Image (cartoon, rainbow, N blue to C red):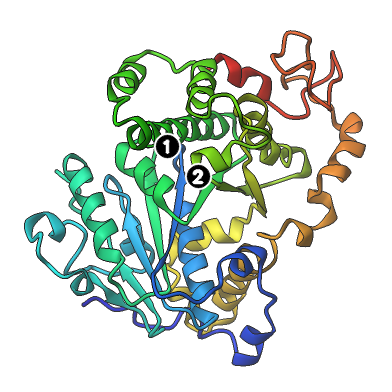
Amino acid sequence: MGSVNQSIASVLTDAELKSMPLNRLTKTILRNTDSPYLIAIGSGKGGVGKTLIAAALAYRLAIEKKSVTLVDMDLGSPGLHTMFKVRPDKTIKDMIHFPALPIDTLLHDTTMPNFKIIYGSPDTLGLCEKAQFIVKTILKAVSRLNSDYIIFDLGTGITEHNVKLFINANLSLLIGTPEPAAIIENFIFLKFCILKRLEALYRNQNGSGKPIFDEIYRSKSIDNQLINSIISNLDAGNWTGSRNDILKFYPKFILNMVREEAEFPYALTLEYALRDIFCLDLKQLGAIPFSSNIRKSLKNISLVEMSDGSAQTAKIYQKIYNELMVTTIDKQALPSRFTVDNFVTRYDREISTDQLICSAKCSLWDRCKYQRGGYPCKIKYIGFFNTN
């Protein structure tokens, strides 16, 4: 098996590790159980930091003495082997050629005995065509692993296997950035997740529904009102409040790479859109400020090399794990400049002419609490989701 040659925690003393406050996300999922807890980390847009967050979360759980298996499920462009500078001898691709291969033979060690990795294949040709088989096999196989947590680092975009793993996880964690493309792609990704949950529920309840959904998937665009009508028909219109319980779908969201307070409302955009259009809740887990040090370190060295003990790499390492996994995932621990209230009070002094303008033409005009016609939209793009 491949092995990470150095501990990624070597620059921190035991006392420092013990003194680190546990972030909200880790508090939420720390538990004892006989079956692995599945965490899927996905996004409709690439380049949002999924892999780093997946690796950091796995590390964070491992130092809490939980056993963790990190699985690279990016079948088109895997990245974990590059991050850890490992040339794996066995990968996800071996599941195609050797279907009876025990999954524990795919596990690669790190120097943390409770942290294992299943790498994706650098040779991705043919993997996406076998995605359904791989997902079915991996979901069945991981249930037999002696691991408290299984973390899936999903590929980018709306694919059958990404959506299936995301909606079947115990924790569905969506990652986004303050970019219009990321917001729109994540909204579309969530729409397909909703449709897949509806398809499964219709099949379980009525034993049918596939022709209806096949027709929807073939259409040029998926109308939001059509999705609403399908949900209403499923529950005979008797639902009250959130529909998450109907769909059994409870996605969570982290906004990554936040550079300034004016970008913080992007964290609320998806939440408001999902609630106002589909009556579904998207729980905010917080925002992670942009760090040029993280970008530089990932371009030049791996997480392993960052633990070589030098002052510079130790400083970079400390910044990544202090900011990424200890405090900034918890919104309450964010610097005051990243809070919504602070943003709203200062917004009038920072009006930009290239932003969307609040208007009565917005589909959410009557319900938006930030309604202020003629000024830049405070919850950017939300009103325009109804046209997608």
Q: Is residue 88 left or right of residue 254?
A: left
Q: Is residue 109 left or right of residue 185?
A: left
- Which residue is disc 1 drawn over? 197
- Is label 2 in contact with label 1 (beta carbons under 8 Å)? yes
| Residue lying at 61% horizontally and 65% vertically, measured from the top left | 28
Q: Locate residue 2, reporting x and y percent.
A: 24, 76
Along the line of sight, the residue nearer the viewer: 77 or 286: 286
Q: Is residue 104 left or right of residue 303?
A: left
| Labelled disc at residue 248 | 2
**The N terminus, quarter of image:** bottom left
Could one spot residue 204 in this view of the protein?
Answer: yes
Spatial separation of the CA atoms under disc 2 and disc 1: 8 Å
Residue 169, by quadrant, is: bottom left
Q: Up-down: is 333 above or below 252?
A: below
Q: Up-down: is 327 above or below 343?
A: below
Along the line of sight, the residue nearer the viewer: 364 or 154: 364
Instruction: Check disc 1 and report its element: helix, strand or loop.
Output: helix
Q: Up-down: is 147 above or below 98?
A: below
| Residue lying at 87% horizontally and 37% vertically, measured from the top left | 344
| Residue lying at 78% horizontally and 17% vertically, measured from the top left | 358
Q: Tag 1: Cα neighbours inside 10 Å, few (<14), some, or many (≥20)? A: many
Could one spot residue 125 in this view of the protein?
Answer: no
Given the image, on which type of amino acid does mark 1 rest?
Answer: Arg
Given the image, on which type of amino acid does mark 2 rest?
Answer: Lys
Q: Locate residue 297, reporting x and y percent.
A: 50, 63
For marks 2 and 1, the one nearer the N-term is: 1
